[in-house]
Amino acid sequence: MRLIDADALIERLEADAEHMDEPVGKMFTYAAISDVKHFLTAVEVVRCDDCVYYDSRRWCGLHSSVFDDNAFCSYGERKE
């Protein structure tokens, strides 16, 4: 997996589209811009044993479930 700067990519595609003379190319470029705008952004994954909702009994207060020490989710909040 590679992280990208989606805002920079959108700016680059918009600049490219403005200089295109071919309508079909411009249409596909704007379609790509729309796709990039809807990409899922990165979220911090927190291992359960590092989460504020997780206690010593391996209980997750957020999901109301028991998890093992290697479990993780994207909804957790890292302990300070």
Image (cartoon, rainbow, N blue to C red):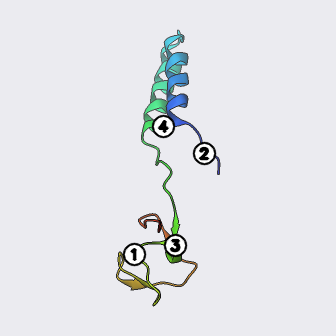
The amino acid sitting under disc 2 is: Leu
| Crowd tier of the residue under label 1, counting other residues whose Cα lies within 10 Å: few below 14, some 14–19, many 20 or above | some
Q: Give the quarter of the image for residue 19.
A: top right
Q: Looking at the image, is mark 2 or mark 1 earlier in the sequence?
A: 2
Labels 2 & 1 near each other (Cβ < 8 A): no
Residue position marked by numbered label 4 in the rendering: 36
The amino acid sitting under disc 1 is: Tyr
Q: Judging from the image, what secondary structure is the residue with disc 4 in?
A: helix
Residue position marked by numbered label 2 in the rendering: 3
Task: Give the foreground label among 2 and 1.
Answer: 1
Residue position marked by numbered label 1 in the rendering: 53
Task: Give the foreground label among 4 and 3.
Answer: 3
Q: Is 41 placed above or below 20 here?
A: below
Labels 1 & 3 near each other (Cβ < 8 A): no
Position of 4 compared to 66: left or right? right
Camera-side residue of 17 and 46 = 46
Image disc number at residue 50? 3
Q: CA distance from mark 2 to mark 1?
A: 28 Å
Q: Looking at the image, is mark 2 or mark 3 earlier in the sequence?
A: 2
Image disc number at residue 13? none
Q: Looking at the image, is mark 4 or mark 1 earlier in the sequence?
A: 4
Task: Give the foreground label among 2 and 3.
Answer: 3
Camera-side residue of 33 and 41 = 41
- Residue, x 41% and y 65% (percent of image)? 75
Percent coordinates x, y for residue 5 in the rendering: 56, 36
Q: CA distance from mark 4 to mark 3?
A: 32 Å
